Image (cartoon, rainbow, N blue to C red):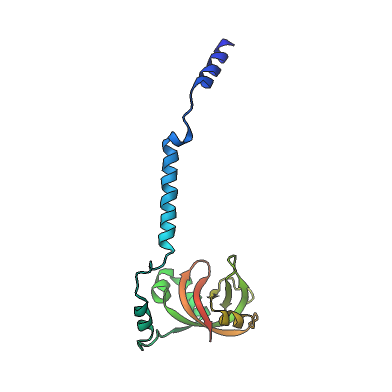
Amino acid sequence: MSNKQTSVTENNGQNKKPIFKKWWFWLIIVLVVLLIIGIAVGTSGNGGNEDPSSVSSSVSSGEPAEEAIQISAVDLLAAYDENAVQADNDYKDKLLEVTGIVNSVDRDILNDVYVTINDGGEYSILSVQCYFEDEDEIAKTAELSAGDEVTIVGTCDGETINVIMRDCTIK
């Protein structure tokens, strides 16, 4: 019993270091600060470095707008199914005009409006998921129903599960 008492008094008799004197505490603090700085820099866009007059001049310079690549939802989904790397090379970050059958009109977890289009098959799982930001375009999505044929123009963002398109408009 004296051995137990001795070990208890040794543990209780030790002076524990305060948490701010431990090396791992400061490591965590540094990582959190770096994370906050990274988020702040990453969300600031161009950091205000671009001259606003150059933005308006590039928009009004009269250069032709990018020509949209016309493709069906079935063909786009097949391209990503066959070879996602080649499909990214062909379509990612490019303006697409995709025609297909509306599968659903919904909002995601962040409350962003999207329309999924595919071949209209009852058992189709994969779709082209088109996100809308413009309020007028969002109003147009409210008029769509499952089974409607639609053509949507937007920028391809690649494939996660579905092929994603952003900044979409209904043609």
Q: Is residue 24 above or below residue 127?
A: above
The residue depicted at 46 percent of the width and 29 percent of the height is 17
The residue depicted at 44 percent of the width and 45 percent of the height is 29
The residue depicted at 42 percent of the width and 41 percent of the height is 26
Q: Is residue 47 above or below residue 1?
A: below
The residue depicted at 62 percent of the width and 73 percent of the height is 106
Quadrant location, the N terminus: top right
**Does any portion of residue 157 appear in the rendered image?**
yes
Q: Residue 91 appears at what percent x and percent y? A: 42, 76
Q: Residue 45 appears at what percent x and percent y? A: 41, 67
**Does any portion of residue 120 appear in the rendered image?**
no
Q: Left or right of 51: which side holds 119?
A: right
Looking at the picture, tell me which residue is in the foreground, 167 or 68: 167
Q: Left or right of 106: which side holds 169?
A: left
Looking at the picture, tell me which residue is in the foreground, 127 or 67: 67
Q: Is residue 140 above or below residue 49?
A: below
Q: Residue 63 appears at what percent x and percent y? A: 35, 87
Q: Left or right of 111: which side holds 68?
A: left
Q: Residue 58 appears at what percent x and percent y? A: 35, 82
Q: Left or right of 107: which side holds 84?
A: left
